[in-house]
Amino acid sequence: MTLYLKYRPQSFADVVGQDHIVTVLEQAVKMSQISHAYLLCGTRGTGKTSVARIIAKTILTQNIEDPVVHENILKAIEEENLVDFIEIDAASHTGVDDIRDIIEKTTFSPIVAKNKVYIIDEVHMLSKSAFNALLKTLEEPPSYVYFILATTELHKVPDTIQSRCQRFLFRRVRDEDIVRRLQYIVDHERITVERDALRAIARAATGSFRDAISLLDQ
């Protein structure tokens, strides 16, 4: 397993450099005001997909009182075999038929959890007809259905879609935050690395956690 996957944030507390987003989301969870549609936007490697998965875990474990079931759901999400959790890459599922298939499945109630979550990464890659099909569901989603959309190119997402979502803009991560995370990783991996080397990696990553950890892995 790559270091990036091994040290991917598993909770809001693990997310670094996006405090403005984490604070709002934690408050929404606390007050039971989770939106049925989120749009996460920003440059690559800033944590959009990780945060999307954390939101999904929060939604899918809502109102699950049995600790065994709760843990099984979390495990199934990590192993990507939970039937109530669907994650697709719009870059390879651009057509209207792909979205219609998703929409048809939203009519079926959750099987394991009490909700269903759909993550659509690189959502800007959808075709115009696919966006139109998605819009209808975003306007009136079933009570148990939640969508989390992620994109690196917000300007390509239609305004009609954006207006139906709660939007979060991810910032480029500061070098000092990247260095701190890299130090955490090397400490846990028991690797000796000079601090100047970590700073050099952070500068080269230009605000991307993913790129920084990939460079460290190399």
Image (tube, rainbow, N blue to C red):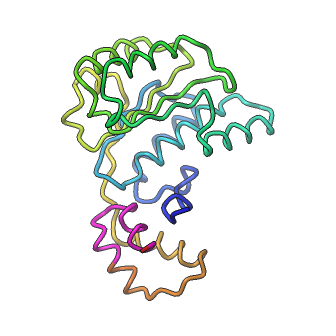
Q: Which residue sits at x=44%, y=15%? A: 103
Q: Which residue sits at x=37%, y=13%? A: 139
Identify the residue at the far left of this view. 155
Q: Is residue 192 left or right of residue 197?
A: right
Q: Quadrant of the N terminus?
A: bottom right
Magenta stretch encompasses residue 202: yes
Q: Quadrant of the C terminus?
A: bottom left
Magenta stretch encompasses residue 10: no
Q: Which residue sits at x=43%, y=34%? A: 88
Provide the residue span drawn in magenta: 201-217
Q: Is residue 28 left or right of residue 111?
A: left
Position of 51 relative to 208 (above/below): above
Q: Which residue sits at x=47%, y=12%? A: 104
Quarter of the figure with residue 109:
top right
Position of 183 relative to 209 (above/below): below
Position of 66 relative to 180 (above/below): above
Q: Nearer the viewer, residue 162 or 119?
A: 119
Measuring from the top left, give residue 190's x and y in whole percent.
Answer: 60, 81
